[in-house]
Image: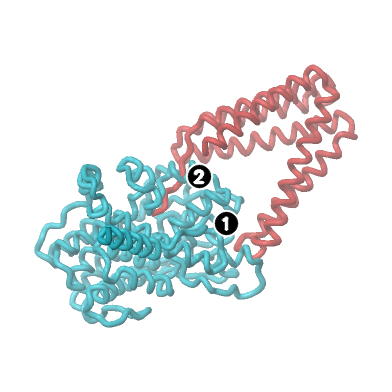
Chain colours: A red, B cyan
Amino acid sequence: MSKMRRVKEILVGLLMILMAIIFFVSPTTGYIAVIVVLSVIFIIIGLKKLWFFLTMASRMVGGRRVLYEGLLILDLGFFTAGINFVPTVYVMIYLGTAYVFAGAIDILNAIDAKKLESSRFKGKLIIGAINIIIGILCFVFLTKNDFLVFIICLGLIYNAIVRIANAFRKHAMVYIQ
Amino acid sequence: MQIDFHYYATYAAAYIAGYSPKEAVDIAYSAFAVDVCSAQLLTKLGAPIVAATTQLQMELMEHHTDIVGLQNITRIWSSFHFLPRDLKAEYNGKCTKKYLRKYRLICGPNGELVRDTIENAKGSTLQAIGIAMHVLADTWAHMYFAGTPSLVINNTDKHLFELFPDGSEKRIAFKHNPVAADKPDEGAYTASIYQSNENNIMNLGHGRIGHLPDYGYCVYKYLPAWNDYKEVIKDNPSDYNKAFRQMVYALQYIRGDRDTFSLDTYAEEEVAPYADEIDKVIRTRKILICDEWKAFGEKLTNETIEDFDIKKYQSEYMDTSDKSNTFLGKFFDASIRHKSMVTNRIYKSGSKLAGISIEQDRTKATLEMVKNTLKVGDDNV
């Protein structure tokens, strides 16, 4: 990770913490802001991936993976934009599913890391477990509006901390001779 | 390729081509120095950063893959490790210009740029010859990959099998732990992880199939990202044998023992007495075969081959004011010239992926002219 990238990660992390605070103080404003930012980001990433598929990756071995990624992310963007108009219970289901899914991915990565005897195993396992616990809590408190605010703030702060911590972590890669 | 081929095999090739053991060591030293001459080393020596011939892990990680970062990466890796085979290549089918520019950077042997590299080394320093040997050898090892980060060119998928002499084959499932050593006997290899970003540094060169191209014994088949789902068989033992023969042939031309350098021509006759021994060394199933190549080289010349020492010429360079006449000074000069030549050839092909460079030869000629003019002026005064 470059220095600039590290700075960017830290700034985004701080912004997420700020959003959590705004959301906690004024839930309605914060809620709309979170939905809008998330949906715009997803839509841009999805469109970029689709453009990349059309111009470059369509002829690549395994290129359809890029197409599917683009469609899924774009769809997620539209869906996220739409959930502004649905009841809290559906937002909770969405959040819960997203957290459980992210947690499962982290735990799978942790299992891989353990197989490779990587020291990152414990960290990934803890992150995965926390994500799954938050997801389960979403399903437990499905109809509680107050809890929705709390869970979003908690999620934002938690992800901000992970992002900032990652910015300070060493990264490794295969060296090509 | 690694130190075993770039240093010890190059030494043997130079000797067979007619160079003395002392000259052969200098050529081999320069050939392998290409793999260690990073910006970090150059900074330490107070040498021009533009002379860098490789990038270390940390340097690559520090790079943005924006256009400036990409150009720096492409200049180094395409010039010294993944020399493009055909900058005028046409893709078989419809594709965008952006795709075509990357497609044309695919490395391979017997291209026009190899010929130009050898032509430029003729009449030049031993350092320039060593660099040319590195570049030539890598065109064989790194065939089918490009020296620029590109998912659509350098990616592979799970269809990758090692082929054994008895006709059997075994699927290779890569691990992604960067500190884990490859274990050929267990079929355990490491490769860079899939990254869907086209310009991610993980998609540089042959990272997606790890170090398989660097192992002389390895024969494998796979689906390169760019080959329209057509399988490719990479026969390293055959390619490494050809690389050795072509090095001897090119070195004979550079020495003046041959009148022309033709592509796809090899020093079969000169290598024939050692062919079986060389083939046996290349097929040794180890990730590094320095001992085998060293034993062969020493038997050939009856002289001990010193191990590669990165510090060998450093104090000579740092302690003198006339740096251009030191061993490393000549190496840096040769590397800048070669990089300039390849960069400009890529630029002239219509691609800005490597940026643009001043013409080193033209610049030197201009400087000489200015210097001579000033001398004439001084005399007149």
- Local packing at callout 1 (Cα closer than 10 Å; few below 14, some 14-19, many 20+) is many
Q: Residues within 10 Å of mark 2 (few under 14, many from 20)?
A: some
**Of A157 and B167, the residue lying toward us:** A157
- Above or below — where is B19 with respect to A80? below
Q: CA distance from mark 2 to mark 1?
A: 17 Å
Q: Which quadrant of the figure has residue B141?
A: bottom left
Q: Is residue A162 left or right of residue B143?
A: right
Q: Position of residue B174 (x, y in %)?
A: 47, 52
Camera-nearest label, 2 or 1 = 2
Q: Secondary structure at mark 2?
A: loop
- Residue under label 2: B63
Q: Quarter of the image holding residue A6? A: top right
Q: Position of residue B269 (x, y in %)?
A: 23, 81
Inspect the image, locate mark 2, and give the three-letter code of the amino acid beneath it. His
Viewer-nearest residue: B228 or B117: B117
Can you give x and y, in whole percent of width and height, for residue B64 in the image? 54, 45
Picture coordinates of residue B296, whole percent (x, y):
18, 64
Could you tell me which quadrant the N terminus of chain B lies in?
Answer: bottom left
Q: Tell me, yes or no, if residue B194 can be seen here.
A: no
What chain is tagged by disc 2? Answer: B
Q: Which mark is residue B151?
A: 1
Which residue sits at x=47%, y=34%?
A170
